[in-house]
Image: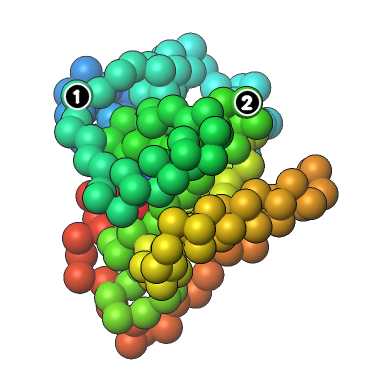
Amino acid sequence: LIFQTLVSLVGTSDEVAEKVLTLLAWSKDEVSDYQRRVLKTTAVVLRRQHPELMKRLGRDAREALHEFEKTPVKVNTFQSRWMAELRRTLQKMDIIVELKALVDDQVLDIWLPTSKAVVCAVGPYGYYAGTTHRTAYSKLHQRVLEMEGHTCLTVPYYEWAELKTEEDKMVYLWSLGRKAASKEKGAGPSKDAEPTTVADELQSDLSDLGEAR
């Protein structure tokens, strides 16, 4: 959607965002579940990054935005095998974990409710094909989690694959947790989730268009 691209990926002015949102508000009853899923995260970004616009939005636009963010959508969720293994490893470490869609109804997150941390298991579709450069959608998912007050512990699939024993995996996760705990509060979004300009030769296989990870 143009609205998501402008608000969440490339940035836009309050005036442009308001005009596009007004157009969406007129046809909000015709929005599909997939479009609502995308609009949900966009609504969070708009609310967090455009506070002045939120104050002056008209009633119709405000109601549409609230509906986009709060209405559950019917989409299939998926948990990869290695993500399930990661979650089981955390449970063996006596860490309370919950599997839930925190900001995107299609993407399951490994949530640690006692610390409000999220273990972001970034799989192959979260990277541009043949590289270790994360896709814009993968980074956006992490940024939205952080906007909502979560601490993100990023676990790339290729790093996890190198861990051969259960002890190695536990040490890796403990080190990741200690690193996150030492991060200063209020330090802002993680650097690995910041938007970047991707070189033209980096190409995705397009499978990430429907994925936030």
Disc on the earlier residue, 1 or 2: 1
- Left or right of residue 152, residue 101 in this image: left
Quarter where residue 112 is shown: top right
Residue 17: x and y, percent? 48, 40
Camera sees residue 108: yes
- Location of mark 1 (residue): 74
Q: What residue type is labelled 2?
A: Thr
Q: Nearer the viewer, residue 83 or 71?
A: 83
Indicate which label's residue lies in the foreground, 1 or 2: 2
What colouring style does the render use? rainbow
Residue 13: x and y, percent? 57, 47
Residue at figure coordinates x 40%, y 18% from the top left: 70
Q: Nearer the viewer, residue 129 or 180?
A: 180
Camera sees residue 64: no
Residue at figure coordinates x 35%, y 37% from the top left: 108
- Location of mark 2 (residue): 114
Q: Is mark 1 on a helix, strand or loop?
A: loop
Q: Which of 8 and 191 is in front in this view?
A: 191
Q: Which amino acid does label 1 sit on?
A: Lys
Residue 81: x and y, percent? 25, 50
Q: In this view, does 133 lie above or below 142?
A: below
Q: Is residue 188 above or below residue 167?
A: above
